[in-house]
Image (tube, helix red, strand yellow):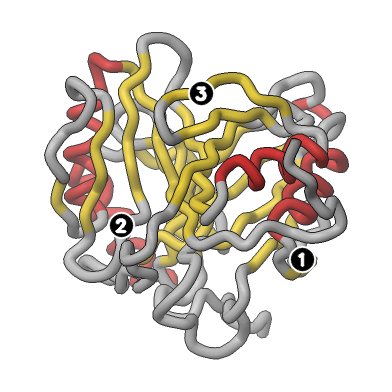
Amino acid sequence: MTSVDATSGLHLRWVDVSLDVPRADVRRAAGFWAAATGGHLSPWRDDGRFVTVVPPAGRPVLRLQAVDDGPVGWHPDLRVGDPERAVAHARARGARVVGRRPGVVVLATPGGQPLCVTGDGEGTGDARPDPTGEPPTRVDQLALDLPPDRAEVDAAFWAGLTGWERVVGRRPELAVLRPEGFGAGPAPQRGVPVRLLLHSLGEDERGRAPWAHLDLAAGSDPAVRRRAVAAHVALGATVVRDTPGWTVLVDPVGATYCLTGRDPLTGAVAPVP
C-alpha cells in the first residue's frame, strides 16, 4: 500500500483542461476550440475518442473526449510523475476512484466533481502557450462551480490536494488556487498553465453536483473584450450573460466558458478605480 503524507500537496507537473462531449458533437466542438484558441487539432486517437488542441507554441492545455453518455462538461487532468501515489493522495483527502483506463485514473472529489490523474513523462515540456488571436486571449483558469452544500468540502479538497496558494477574491464567493509563479507580475512562461477558481454558488444551486467551466483572459479594456466576444460569436459561440468583469458564453455544443477581464499576459485583474 502506498504511504502518503496527507498534509502535503501533490507535485503537479501540468494540468490539462478536458472537455467531455457526446460523440455526435465532438468534432464540431474540437473545430471550434482549435479556431478560438488559434491552434490545430492533433490526430484523433482511440477510434476518434480523444483529440488535443495543439497551440502555435508551447505545450497543449486543451483536450476533448467523446463520451457515449452524459452531458457536456469540463474537468481537469492532473499530470504527475507517480500517478498511483497521486491517487492515494486524493483518496486520503476523500476522493473516490470511479474508473480506470490505460494510463489514466478517473476520480470524483468528495462533492462529486470528476477529475483525472495521469502520468507525465520526462521530456514533454512545460512551456505555457502564449496568448493567441486578435485581440489576444489565453486559457488560464478552470472555474470549479461548487453548490453551497458541497463548497466547503471540495474547496478544502482542492487546496489540500494541490498545495497551491489560496487567495480570496474581491467577491466573497470567489477564491483562487494559483500555482507557483502566478502573482501580480508577468506570468511565468513555464510551469502549470492554469489556476483553479473556487466558485461558491448560491442557495438555489443546493443539491446539485459540482461542475466546471473554462475561463480565458481577454483583458480589462471593455472595448477589447467586446471584440474578443464578437470573434467567438463569429465562430459559433452564443453570449449568455455580460457583466463588468466577464462575459459568459456557450460554445456550439453547449459547453459554458467565460471571457474575463484578466490580463492575458499576467493573469492580473485591473485595480478597482
**Side (left or right) of 96 relative to 150:** left
The one of 139 and 164 positioned closer to us in this rendering:
164
Please name the amino acid that badge 3 sits on.
Arg
In the displayed structure, does residue 273 sit left or right of residue 150?
left
Q: Secondary structure at mark 2?
A: loop
In the structure shown, which secondary structural element does the residue marked by tag 1 occupy? strand
Query: What's the residue type where badge 2 is placed?
Result: Pro
Q: Earlier in the sequence, mark 3 or mark 2?
A: 2
Query: Residue extending furthest top?
Result: 69
Q: Could you give the CA–CA distance between mark 1 and mark 3, rounded to whole angstroms?
A: 30 Å
Residue holding disc 2 = 60
Res. 150 image quadrant: top right
Residue 100's tag is 3
Q: Nearer the viewer, residue 76 or 202?
A: 76
Residue 25 image point, x, y percent:
25, 21
Q: Quadrant of the N terminus?
A: top right
**Image point 32% across, 62% down: which residue?**
124
| Disc on res. 166 | 1
Q: Residue at x 48, y 36 (%)?
A: 74
Amino acid type at circle 1 is Arg
Residue 220 visible somewhere in the drawing: no
